[in-house]
Image (cartoon, rainbow, N blue to C red):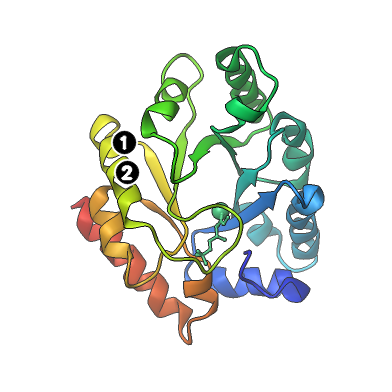
Amino acid sequence: MLSSDFANLASEAQRMLDFGADWLHMDIMALCPKSYNWCSSYRESKKTHSVMLQILAYLDCHLMVTNPLDYVEPLGKAGASGFTFHVEVSKVMPIVDFVDNWQELVEKIKSKGMKPGVALKPGTPIEEVYPLLEGHNPVEMVLVMTVEPGFGGQKFMLETMDKVRALRKKYPSLDIEVDGGLGPSTIDAAASAGANCIVAGSSMFGAPEPAQVIKLLRKSVEEAQQ
Ligand SMILES: O=C(CO)[C@@H](O)[C@H](O)COP(=O)(O)O
Ligand SMILES: [Fe+2]
C-alpha cells in the first residue's frame, strides 16, 4: 500500500483486492509511528461498505521499527492480521537476552490474534532467523527483504535469493515472503528459489492492468511449487 494514493486508501485497497490480491501489505516505519492508523482507518471505512470485506481482507503489517513490542496492542486493536518485526531489532534494542524477549513478543502477537513473522534486511545472514523458527513459540513467516527497507520502487537484489533457497530447503512448508522490487521481470527468480508470498508495490500500482500482473505472479509461484 506504500505505492498507493494515500488520499484514497480505501478505494485503492478495494481496487487491488478486486484485481485478485490475497493480502494488503502495510509498511509501518519508525519515523511514522502512527502509520498503524492506516489499518483502523481502513477497517472503519469498510464498515460502511461491506462487513464481509472487513473480515476477509488480510492486513499484512511489516514493522520497520526498533520497538515492535510497543506496537502489538495498537496494531491488534487496529485490525492487523499479520505482525512481522525485524530481526535486526536485537542489535539496536537495549536488550540483554533477545531470545527471551522475542519469545515474549511472539506470544503477545499471537494473543492479539495476529500471525507472527520475522523480517531481515538484505545484509543480514539467514542464520539469524533460525532460532526464531525453533522452540515452543516459533514465528510463522519469514520476510526476506529484497531491497533495503525505506521506500518502494527500488531494484530487486538477486543475491538475496540464496537466503530464500536455504530457508526453503530447511523449512519446506514455511511461509516465505519476499518484499521489494517484485514484478513480472523478477518473479521467476523469487518463485524458483522458494518464495510463496509476494509483495508487489510499484509493479502493481504502476501497471495499466494490475489483474494481469497478479495472474502472472501467481502462476509463477504455482508452477514453481509444482
Ligand atoms: O518494505 C518495503 C520497503 O521498505 C516494501 O514493502 C516496498 O514498499 C515494496 O515496494 P516495491 O519495491 O514493490 O515498489
Ligand atoms: Fe514491506
Indicate yes or no: mark 2 CB to ligand 2 under 8 Å. Answer: no
At x 39%, y 25%, the residue is 130
Q: Is residue 223 left or right of residue 197?
A: left
Which percent across, then down, holds residue 31? Answer: 76, 50
Look at label 1 and name its amino acid: Leu
The residue at the far left in this view is 226
For disc 2, the marked residue is 164
Label 2 residue SS:
helix
Q: Horizontal and vertical percent for residue 220?
A: 27, 64
Residue 44 falls left or right of residue 95? right
Determine which of the numbered discs, if any, sits on residue 167 in the image: 1
Point out residue 99 in the picture as x, y percentages from the top left corner: 55, 15
Front residue of this view, candidates 72 and 211: 72
Give the residue displayed 42% in from the left and 25% down from the top.
Answer: 133
Residue 113 falls left or right of residue 182: right
Q: Give the crowd class for mark 1: few <14, some 14-19, many >=20 residues within 10 Å.
A: many
Q: Distance between the residues labelled 1 and 2?
A: 5 Å
Whether pointer 1 and pointer 2 mark residues with C-beta atoms closer than 8 Å, the reply is: yes
Q: Residue at x 26, y 59 (%)?
A: 189
Q: Can residue 70 be seen in this view?
A: yes
